[in-house]
Image: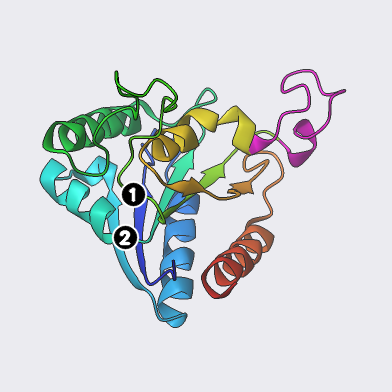
Amino acid sequence: MTIKKVFIINAHQRYEGFSEGKLNQALVDTATKTLEKLGCEVQTTHIEKGYDVAQEIEKHEWADLIITQTPVYWFNTPWMHKKYVDEVFTTALSQGKIIIDDGRTRSDPSKQYGTGGLSQGKKYLLSATWNAPKEAFDDESQFLFAGRTADDVLFNLSVNYRFCGFEAVEGHHTHDVIKSPKVEASLNEYRDRLSNLVTG
């Protein structure tokens, strides 16, 4: 599927004096400008500013690519993003939109769990900001993540979309944002990542 329509979800939740949201907004703005230059239509939602569940379902149905832009708080997204996911996807399931069921049937037990999505051909990308340095990942000698990638650590986010039929593509991760930020390098990498995804 050619990517022409992109929906970006800003999952940032503000904590005054600690996490203001400027970097996550810069990543949303960079993605929006890059994608529009590539000829894509872009819609956005900033969860903290409020949303309408029915409209969020429509945006998911409309888009060829969904991007979640999020800070990592305690190795997950902010709590209001989980609330958003629960509300949007549970309502979509009840209406037979995005996903119809878990894919299994009593008449055919060979059908696998997680194959009931209605969003085949669509893609999902996670863009996350971390205090953790890049060196903490992909290295079995590292204490905390023990060789896992950043995508592995946040697998619960991508698997939610995979459950609905989306193809999860390699994410974009901005590391060490508190102690050693390299913002411009991350923004440039993100521009290249999105350009390759859309034109590739």
- Left or right of residue 31: residue 59: left
Main SS of the magenta part reads: loop
Q: Earlier in the sequence, mark 2 or mark 1?
A: 2
SS at badge 1: loop
Q: Which residue lies furthest to the right in this view?
A: 141
Tell me: residue 158, above or below residue 7. Answer: above
| Residue under pointer 2 | 63
- Which residues are the magenta region? 133-150
- Left or right of residue 66: residue 92: left
Q: Is residue 135 magenta?
A: yes
Quarter location, residue 106: top left
| Residue under pointer 1 | 119
Q: Can residue 152 be seen in this view?
A: yes
Residue 76 lies, in percent from the top left, at: 49, 27
- Left or right of residue 95: residue 115: right
Amino acid at the residue labelled 2: Ala
Q: Quadrant of the C terminus?
A: bottom right
Instruction: Work out whether residue 60 or residue 106 is closer to the camera in this orientation and state it.
Output: 106
Quarter location, residue 136: top right
Q: Residue at x 44, y 66 (%)?
A: 1
Q: Is residue 73 magenta?
A: no
